[in-house]
Image (tube, rainbow, N blue to C red):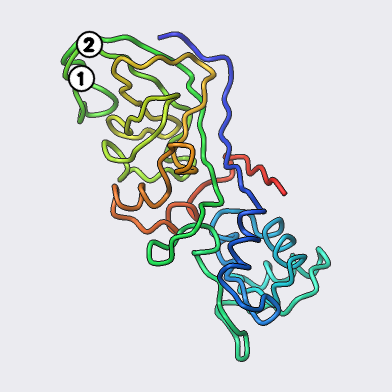
């Protein structure tokens, strides 16, 4: 394999999407409560709360007392409920805020990418990853992506979940390892350092987190909430 030059693991969160979705879901943001449990479903509690507070959201639901204290320390002056919505909390804005609710289709707020760290051209019938649960059907190109179950990528996504490598739509190939997974891109082209989109914006031709949910049978909020700390959160206004 050709070794890659570095490792980038990024979840890019578009706060403008979160704000516009909140406005679309609620007639009055002041009377609404945003469900920001589990670090805003993996999107980053403080940046998301700042954006929604500035937009006029009246309160937040958080997972822990420590989360409520963190919001207070950040100067976010809104009603905070720990564990669940309190009385008079108005409309509850939940997973749909982030494009995670299949019943209420909204724009996804997160785009998750990993970096290709190696590329290998192989012959037919080559076993891939641990246990060889996938074997190549013909001569093909395999790429190694620097994301794994240590980053919260669920192992049930092995051999199932869609990914985008340049213009090539592939899927996770073979078993997901601790720090990486493989994608069979067929005749597609790729180089070390190229990004691989796990899920993002369908308007850009990318798979979505809801596509992942359908493919692996795990709810979208679970997928994003499990993403680990090695993944850099990059928030855009």
In the rendered picture of this protein, how many numbered marks are placed on residues? Answer: 2
Tell me the residue that label 1 is attached to. 136
Q: Position of residue 149 (x, y in %)?
A: 42, 40
Point out which mark residue 158 bears. Answer: none
- Marks 2/1 in contact by CB < 8 Å: the verdict is yes
Q: Position of residue 76 (x, y in %)?
A: 79, 68
Front one among 199 and 176: 199
Q: Disc 2 to disc 1, how far (Cα)?
A: 7 Å
Would you say 73 lies left or right of 29 here?
A: right
Position above or below: 136 against 196: above
Question: Which residue sits at x=37%, y=33%?
Answer: 177
Question: Which residue sits at x=47%, y=34%?
Answer: 197
Tell me the residue that label 2 is attached to. 139
Position above or below: 17 against 190: below
Would you say 186 lies left or right of 8 here?
A: left
Q: Secondary structure at mark 2?
A: loop
């Amino acid at each position: 394999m050709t070794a890659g030059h570095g490792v980038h693991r990024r979840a890019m969160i578009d706060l403008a999407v979160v704000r516009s979705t909140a406005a679309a879901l609620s007639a009055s943001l002041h009377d609404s409560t945003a469900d920001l449990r589990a670090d805003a479903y993996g999107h980053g509690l403080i940046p998301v709360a700042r954006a929604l507070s500035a937009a006029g959201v009246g309160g937040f639901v958080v997972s822990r007392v420590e989360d409520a204290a963190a919001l207070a320390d950040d100067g976010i002056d809104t009603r905070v409920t720990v564990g669940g919505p309190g009385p008079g909390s108005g409309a509850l804005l939940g997973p749909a805020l982030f494009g995670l609710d299949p019943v209420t289709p909204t724009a996804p707020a997160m785009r998750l990418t990993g970096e290709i760290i190696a590329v290998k051209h192989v012959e037919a019938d080559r076993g891939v990853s641990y246990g060889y649960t996938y074997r190549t059907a013909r001569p093909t190109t395999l790429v190694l992506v620097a994301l794994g179950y240590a980053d919260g990528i669920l192992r049930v996504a092995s051999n199932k979940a869609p990914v985008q490598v340049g213009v090539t739509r592939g899927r996770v190939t073979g078993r997901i390892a601790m720090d990486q997974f493989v994608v069979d891109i067929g005749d597609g082209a790729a180089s070390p350092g190229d990004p691989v989109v796990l899920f993002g914006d369908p308007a850009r031709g990318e798979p979505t987190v809801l596509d992942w949910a359908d493919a692996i049978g795990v709810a979208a909020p679970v997928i994003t909430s499990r993403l680990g700390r090695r993944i850099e959160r990059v928030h855009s206004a």
